[in-house]
Image (cartoon, helix red, strand yellow):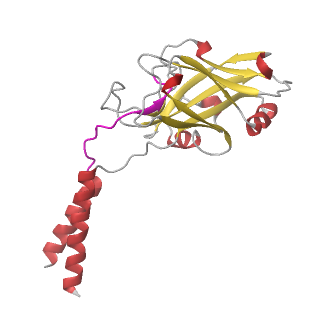
């Protein structure tokens, strides 16, 4: 009896630890931006009186990996393996870093980003996604090393705005107005200032077959416990 219980527990643990093969669809915005010019990502201040190109841009994925400095792709969301994105089913969060000169009095700010047309920057199973902007704490070093902490930071903290994005934005520049939190941060910043972006949703969930196996294993364990009682 003891051996059978141990065997059942081992089966459940194997289901929990073995990663099944996945073929997820994409849910992303700002894809296919590799190699785009600096003018694809700008900070527009005071109604256009001052326009800054990003000095650094890129992404971190949910494993903590980053595309590094100089690649310039700023996809946000999941790049799936079952469609044209041909990715690894990981969720990406992007970042943009700008260098501010001291003494600026900033009254308005927009993040101006290009979203490619073909292949599409927006690709999702739903008609729209929510893209949110956040403060960052490590602006000067973003993209220099893999970091789960930086990935988490790009989608949490002080919010700078939230926006609905959809396929109509493919092939266009989008001006995303930053809120009062961002203005306060900009006016107190010196040197590098950064912003992180995340697509809500797209979390990794178990495959249905995995859930069936897990449920079967748990039922077996519960049954043995009841028989023992």
Horizontal relation, residue 185 to residue 147: left or right: right
Horizontal relation, residue 14 to residue 58: left or right: left
Which residue extends farthest bottom?
A: 229
Range of the magenta residues?
A: 18-31
Q: Is residue 94 above or below residue 2?
A: above
Q: Which x, y percent locates residue 174? A: 61, 22
- The image quarter containing residue 14 is bottom left
Numbered marks: total = 0
- The answer to whether residue 68 is seen in the rendering is no
- The answer to whether residue 186 is seen in the rendering is yes
Q: Main secondary structure of the magenta part?
A: loop
Q: Is residue 144 magenta?
A: no
Q: Residue at x 58, y 42 (%)?
A: 153
- The image quarter containing residue 11 is bottom left
Q: Looking at the figure, which quarter contains the C terminus?
A: bottom left
Q: Is residue 21 magenta?
A: yes
Q: Residue at x 73, y 16 (%)?
A: 51
Q: Which x, y percent locates residue 56? A: 60, 22
Q: Is residue 39 above or below residue 148?
A: above
Q: Is residue 6 above or below residue 208?
A: below
Q: Nearer the viewer, residue 14 or 114?
A: 114
Q: Which x, y percent locates residue 83? A: 32, 28
Q: Residue at x 80, y 16 (%)?
A: 49
Q: Which x, y percent locates residue 118? A: 42, 16
Horizontal relation, residue 59 to residue 10: left or right: right
Q: Looking at the figure, which quarter contains the N terminus?
A: bottom left
Horizontal relation, residue 105 to residue 222: left or right: right
């Amino acid at each position: 009896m003891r051996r059978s219980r141990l065997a059942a527990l081992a089966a459940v643990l194997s289901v929990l630890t073995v990663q099944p093969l996945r073929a997820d669809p994409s849910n992303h915005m700002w894809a296919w931006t590799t190699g785009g010019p600096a003018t694809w990502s700008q900070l527009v201040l005071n109604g256009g009186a001052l326009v800054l190109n990003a000095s650094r841009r890129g992404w971190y994925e949910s494993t903590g990996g980053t595309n590094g400095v100089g690649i310039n792709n700023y996809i946000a969301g999941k790049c799936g393996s079952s469609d044209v994105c041909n990715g690894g089913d990981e969720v990406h969060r992007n970042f943009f870093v700008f260098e501010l000169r001291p003494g600026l009095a900033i009254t308005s700010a927009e993040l101006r980003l290009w979203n490619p047309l073909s292949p599409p920057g927006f690709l999702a199973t739903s008609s729209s996604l929510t893209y949110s902007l956040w403060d960052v704490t490590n602006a000067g070093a973003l993209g220099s090393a893999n970091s789960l902490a930086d990935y988490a930071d790009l989608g949490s903290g002080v919010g700078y705005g939230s926006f609905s994005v959809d396929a109509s934005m493919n092939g266009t520049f989008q001006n995303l107005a930053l809120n009062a939190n961002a203005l306060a941060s900009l006016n107190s910043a010196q040197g590098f200032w950064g912003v992180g972006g995340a697509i809500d949703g797209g979390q990794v969930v178990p495959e249905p077959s995995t859930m069936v196996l897990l449920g079967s294993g748990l039922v077996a364990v519960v049954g043995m416990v009841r028989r023992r009682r």
